[in-house]
Amino acid sequence: MDIVKTLRIVSVAEAVSFLVLLLVAMPLKYGADAPVAVQIMGPIHGVLFLAYVGLVLVGRQATGWDNKRTLLALIASVLPIAPFFVERNWLRPVADAAVRADEAPERQAV
């Protein structure tokens, strides 16, 4: 699996885990006195957060991002829905361009 595809998957997973933590686990902890939801979702989100940050840094070259876009993608990791934006607007076009580039030689060979 290439780095851009992995980053796309982790970006969405991190955003979903953050929303579940904020919208489900935290209300259960404070509203229903059920801290187990945060005890489960907290570490899952933490691992996904670290994976996202690491993959943004490692995948910077593969995506062609400059320092500004890399910094914005890192800032996106602390905003609940921003990783969806990163995946949709910055990572998907890179992945689509790579697929088109891979298909181009096959079309010429036929």
Image: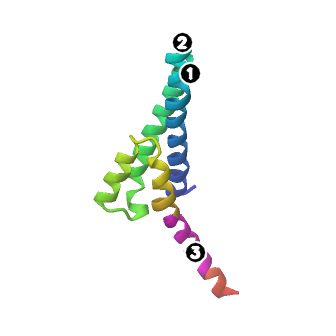
Relative depth, front residue between 74 and 33? 33
The single residue placed furthest to the top in the displayed view is 33
The furthest residue to the right: 110
For mark 2, what is the residue?
A: 33
Residue sitting at 45 percent across and 61 percent down?
Answer: 90
Residue segment shown in magenta: 93-104
Q: CA distance from mark 3 to mark 2?
A: 51 Å
How many circles with numbers are drawn on the protein?
Answer: 3
Q: Identify which amino acid the numbered label 1 is placed on.
A: Ala
Circles 3 and 1: CB distance less than 8 Å? no
16 with respect to 79 (left or right): right
Residue 103 in the magenta stretch? The answer is yes
At mark 2, the secondary structure is loop
Q: Is residue 50 above or below residue 38?
A: below
Q: Please name the residue that numbered disc 1 is placed on.
A: 37
Q: Residue at x 58, y 55 (%)?
A: 1
Helix, strand or loop at mark 3: helix
